[in-house]
Amino acid sequence: MTNGLQFSWELSGTGWAMCLIKDGSSERKDIVSYCTDALADLLHGVAGLYGPIPVQRFSFDLEPAEVRWVLRGRGSDVDLAIYRFPDMFASFDAPDQEGTLVWGSTQPRRLLGHVVMEAAQSVLQVHGEDGYLAKWVQHSFPIAALQDLRRLHLQHDRCQLQHGVATT
């Protein structure tokens, strides 16, 4: 049980992935393009919450729109905010507030780390590294980023949820 926080990342076609995050009250779903190394950016962003920089930002290209995730660590919790911009090329360096807030939630870091790690692990189990590259095309599966997040999560969080085993 994840106290209402759910996250999934599913390859939905060549160069596309469906990203879904939801809590007990709302959800956000985006179809993400392979123009960026989106899954790696997500894994690095969540892993960054375990370090000294309390705010992590990364963007997904929706061709042409941008969705920017802003993760703010607050003790053992994370404030998640997703902003949407109409054109990634025009907005990439724009302040967050120029976008439209389309989803927000506050969650324990251990839970966010867990659901993101498990979703990435599921992608790896379904497709394997070769299958991922064949579908995502421009970027290899971010195995090192997944392993880094797993190590940080297990080292720093007292997560009581079941954990899968990363394969390489």
Image (cartoon, helix red, strand yellow):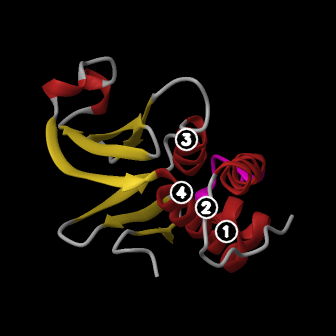
Q: Position of residue 16 (x, y in %)?
A: 46, 60
Identify whether 94 is placed above or below 139: above
Q: Quote the CA–CA distance across marks 3 and 4.
A: 18 Å
Q: Secondary structure at mark 4?
A: helix
Residue position for label 1: 121
Q: Amino acid at mark 2?
A: Met
Residue 109 horizontal side relative to residue 28, left or right: right
Q: Earlier in the sequence, mark 3 or mark 2?
A: 3
Question: In the displayed image of the protein, which residue is found farthest to the right?
Answer: 168
Q: CA distance from mark 3 to mark 1?
A: 15 Å
Contact between marks 3 and 1 (CB within 8 A): the answer is no
Q: Quadrant of residue 120?
A: bottom right
* Label at residue 110: 4
The answer to which of marks 4 and 1 sits earlier in the sequence is 4
Q: Earlier in the sequence, mark 3 or mark 4?
A: 3
Secondary element at image label 3: helix
- Is 101 in the magenta? no
